[in-house]
Image (spheres, rainbow, N blue to C red):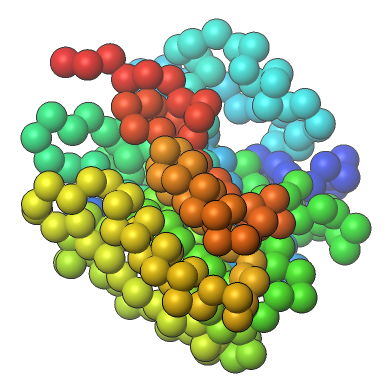
Amino acid sequence: MAASEPVSGHPVRVFEAVVAEVRDLSPHFRRVTLTGPSLLDFGVPGPTLDLRIKLLLPNPGHPLRLPGVNGVLEAGWYQDWLKQDQPGRGFIRSYTVRALRRPPSGPEVDVDFVLHRGPGSRPGPGSGWALEAAPGCQAWFVGPDITAVTAATPLPEAGINWKPGRSDRVLLAGDETAVPAISSILEALPPQISGHAFLEVPEAADVLPLATKSGVQVSWLHRGTGDVQRGARLLAAVQQALASDAGTWHPYAWIGAEAATVRSLRRCLTESGVDPRASELRGYWSLGKAGSGVNGIPVPQR
């Protein structure tokens, strides 16, 4: 797939890449760096923020049927992909671009994966692929084509859902699946933005380096090895922050976590007078299901 190939105007396309590096960041985070000439046309004008891509994953032992023609996609491509039969259809999983660099040697894209480890854990297609990834492996993903994205392109169509408008106070909250997006957003925020960011991770060793020029107070919350319910510390921290600042701020909220946790946080925002409809709340996954958010498919129990 040649870089700068003419496109139909649809803001996303299929990009072909190879794995350049694999690095474990912590017990539950693994970074996979992708590169390749196709990525010369990948990206959006400005910071990537919470930019998502859709990783195309084959069923083991079966060639992947890529959507579109020569990487070019049209409106409705996803519905057409769903009509394909397994095992040739493979899987699509959404991930956040943790970083996009353009050194002289060629563009590089970092994607951070959450690794599900522990007794009885069963990796899904995405984390399973990350566990097996090694330099030289091929990868395909759907993402924005910078030659087709214009100022008139709605940000969600390009893969970005961060839309704070003129708000100078923000509330970011997420579990480990949202750590890459929240980290990327924080790194892009200017100094005049203030607020709170809460990141819940499995254990203290999963706290990752994070820099921001903003005035946002960043708090890492770890569940540890006790009986702490998933999302409980995240919900408590958000409730406390909203209560302590009650009546003094009306933040733009960005939340990404397990679907049930997001529902609880939505109620929390509403009860505190923050309109969830003016914010961004995303159920990144659902407990007991494989796939994205409420659209996940129940995982058979052993």
Q: Residue furthest top?
A: 85
Q: Is residue 296 visible?
A: yes
Above-or-below relation of 123 to 248? above
- 36 versus 247 height, above or below: above
Q: Is residue 7 shown left or right of residue 59?
A: right
- From the viewer's side, name the closer residue of 29 and 147: 29
Q: Position of residue 263 (x, y in %)?
A: 49, 42
Q: Residue at x 37, y 26 (%)?
A: 289
The spot of residue 23 in percent (x, y) is 28, 61
How far from the left and from the top, in percent, is residue 183? 46, 69
The number of numbered discs placed on residues in the rendered structure image is 0
Q: Name the residue: 32% across, 40% down.
A: 127
Q: Work out which quarter of the rendered image holds the C terminus and state it.
A: top left
Report x, y in % for residue 50.
58, 60
- Give the answer, above or below, for where 270 lies relative to 98: above
Identify the residue at horizontal 87%, vertical 40% (top origin): 8
| Residue lying at 26% horizontally and 69% vertically, measured from the top left | 207
Please tell me in which quadrant of the rendered image residue 24 appears. Answer: bottom left
Position of 166 compared to 91: left or right?
right
Answer left or right for 30 relative to 94. left
Determine if residue 284 is in view: no
